[in-house]
Amino acid sequence: MSRTVKILAALLTLSVALNLLVGGMILGRWLQGPHGMKGEHAVLRQGGDRPQGKRPRDFVERFVASAPEEMRPYMREALEGRREEAQAHRSEVQEARRAVGTALAAEPFDRAAAGAALERLRTVTAEGQRRLHEVVLQAYEAAPPEVRAKAAARQWRERGEKGEPQGR
């Protein structure tokens, strides 16, 4: 074999190896989703209503997927027609977070402005939690007593008894 053929063969082998490496990384990232198999994905792997590794489209779907299986139909019903409201609220939260980041990075540092931005974020976040609690109340109110009892034990009481955070 001539020297040129050996060099071309080595370069071709290196190119194939790099393509396989990059392709494997892309495929792995795609299969795991944007945040790996943790957080929302772990909830889905433990009995969510979507295939393993598939991330729900939006916050509303992730919220439903986080509920005990027997409560999901009632959660969906309670959330019916609120998707746009939820997306608008999410935008509000993102805007408030950006304002906090801007205020905290400002030079010179303005403690009052940063405090006001953090207060706004607290207010927006608390409003979102209030809305979600209303959805939970509506869903549990609509569910039959046996479903309510089972779901409440799984999502609220048992979790707290194991030293884990109560609620979601």
Image: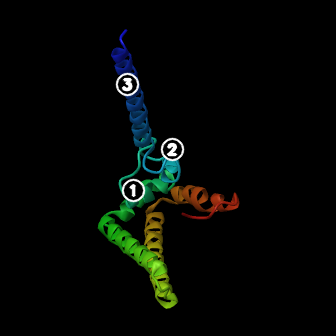
The picture quadrant where one finds residue 2 is top left
Q: How many marks?
A: 3
Badge 1 or badge 3: first in the primary sequence: 3
Could you classify mark 1 by the number of other residues whose Cα lies within 10 Å: few (under 14), some (14-19), or many (20 or more)?
some
Residue under the point 41% across and 45% down: 54
Q: Amino acid at mark 1?
A: Glu
**Does the rendering let one see residue 123?**
no
| Above/below status of 111 relative to 148 | below
According to the image, label 1 marks what residue?
Answer: 61
Question: Toward the viewer: 153 or 84?
Answer: 84
**Badge 3 is on which residue?**
11
Work out whether residue 13 or residue 53 is closer to the camera in this orientation and state it. 13
Residue 27 x, y percent position in the rendering: 40, 37
- Which sits in the foreground, 58 or 109? 109
Mark sitting on residue 45? 2
Image position, residue 29 (x, y; %): 43, 42
